[in-house]
Amino acid sequence: MIEMPSRSADPALAGPVRRLFLDDDPQRAAEFLAEYPDAVWVETVEDCVAKLEGCWDEVYLDHDLGGEQFVDASRADCGMAVVRWLAFEPRPHLRTTRFIIHSHNGVAAYVMLLQLKNLGLNVSASPFGEGLWRKPLPPPPPLWKRAIVWLRSSRLPEPVSEPTNHDAVP
């Protein structure tokens, strides 16, 4: 189940949330559309780009399309192509849109996230089905604290003494 934050209480935005969902998997689309029946599902980069000419509140992007997994990000038929289209020229009508990268291809999702952040867009990433906007993990302790914990937990070997032979005659 995908968790979504509630829409702003601004009366001007009281209408339904406009959601665009790019994904090639009919099962994921069915699950998404069951949760958000007003969403628009597209399966290709071309369809997604055409729909992005309009205004959207939320845009969900998958990276690997066409039934393939871990595809090259330079291809024209993957979610990165949508990111390149967004970067090609300013898209002021999408400045307030929330972009969610839901690809299970972690490396590609991270690159898409960084590119969209560099464009100044509101973006987050979470693989589909793992729940969006989970409470973030606390930052790790400083390196010196981790070193002390590691040193305290490490067992140094006992010193080895030379065997003594008390029965030996000089």
Image: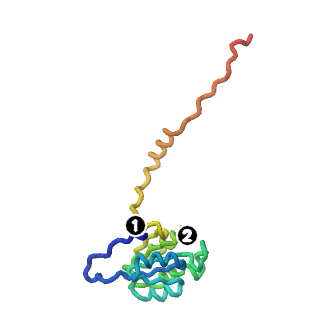
Residue at x 53%, y 79% (from the top left corner): 26
- Give the colour scheme shown: rainbow
Assess disc 1: are there few (<14), some (14-19) or many (≥20) residues with their C-alpha within 10 Å of its C-alpha: few
Where residue 150 appears, as percent x and y from the top left, is: 50, 43
Q: Secondary structure at mark 1?
A: loop
Q: Which mark is residue 133?
A: 1
The residue type indicated by label 2 comes to: Asn
Q: CA distance from mark 2 to mark 1?
A: 18 Å
- The quadrant of the rendering that contains the N terminus is bottom left
Q: Do labels 2 and 1 touch, CB within 8 Å?
A: no
Mark 2 element type: loop
Instruction: Give, as a three-letter code, the residue at label 1.
Output: Trp
Is residue 147 placed above or below 65 in the rendered structure?
A: above
The circle on residue 105 is 2
Mark 2 or mark 1, earlier in chain? 2
Of the pair 62 and 121, the residue shown nearer to us: 62
Q: Is residue 112 visible?
A: yes
User: Where residue 168 appears, x then y in whole percent?
Assistant: 73, 13
Residue lying furthest top: 169
Question: What residue appears at the point 44 percent right and 53 percent down from the top-left corner?
Answer: 140
Q: Where is residue 126? Give x, y as percent.
A: 46, 68
User: Is 148 above or below relative to 90?
Assistant: above
